[in-house]
Amino acid sequence: MLIKKTSVLLDDIRHNDSLCYIREGFGGRKIEYWPMYSFFCQYVSGDKDEAITNFSRWYRGQFNKYCKVSKRYGGMLNGSLYKLIQKRLRIEFGRHFKNPEEVKSAFIDMVIHERVTQRMELLDDIIKNGYIINRSYPVVARLNNNKIFIEDGHHRAAILKALGYESIPGAFLFKSNTAFRLFGRFWRIYKVIL
């Protein structure tokens, strides 16, 4: 079987190793090195406002650097934040952008704050209700040279680690890079089968 649903130890997880993430110093590294992990730890320790501010500031810097770089390389072009900005522009102004530089800085900051707040609300929900596997958006990882690289679910993994969990249940683990390259884009179909 090329993919299996399993529980993955958080200490074994590494950030996916896309070019931009490697350039930033956390690609291919354990959760403790991921910037969002430090923001979640700060939030859990009680410094909630500062954590949101720091996370938003970092996220804005990443967007400024990588908004024209494809998600495939770890950039933000057509990533979740990019799409959220487009969605908010359509809702509020009836238009979309082709060039992020067309969008007012304050609008981007507002959307980033919204996204960071959503991440912290997820953290609060896990504190209150425990971790619940999201069948629509499961954590997806791939095995390469006996290391597990997370491809989808980075924030959930970092939150669980910040909260002291040892593993992340219900992850979909591709048994190799080849399996992920061949079938990774279609994992939502396979989760129904598994």
Image (spheres, rainbow, N blue to C red):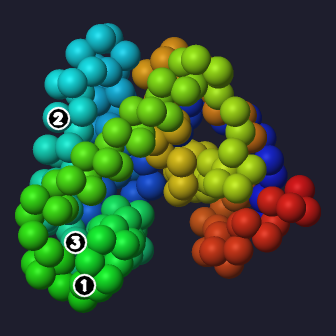
The image quadrant that residue 20 belongs to is bottom left
Q: Quadrant of the C terminus?
A: bottom right
| For residue 8, above or below residue 111 | above
Mark carried by residue 82: none
Query: Label 1, on which residue?
Result: 97
Whichever of labels 1 and 3 marks the residue nearer the N terminus, that label is: 3
Q: Position of residue 27 (x, y in %)?
A: 34, 51
The image quadrant that residue 189 belongs to is bottom right
**Residue that protrudes farthest toward the right in the picture:** 193
What is the C-alpha distance between the residues marked 2 and 3? Answer: 19 Å
- In the depicted view, which residue is nearer to us: 187 or 64? 64
Give the secondary structure at mark 1.
loop
Query: Label 2, on which residue?
Result: 54
Q: Position of residue 18 (x, y in %)?
A: 37, 63
Query: Label 3, on which residue?
Result: 67
- In the depicted view, which residue is nearer to us: 65 or 127? 127
What is the C-alpha distance between the residues marked 1 and 3? Answer: 12 Å
**Residue that protrudes farthest toward the top in the picture:** 45
| Residue plotted at (54% across, 48% down) | 153
| For residue 45, above or below residue 174 | above
- In the depicted view, which residue is nearer to us: 65 or 17? 65
The three-letter amino acid code for the residue at tag 2 is: Asn
Is residue 113 at all visible to an observer of this figure? Answer: yes
| For residue 144, above or below residue 121 | below
| Residue plotted at (24% across, 33% down) | 52
The image quadrant that residue 12 belongs to is top right
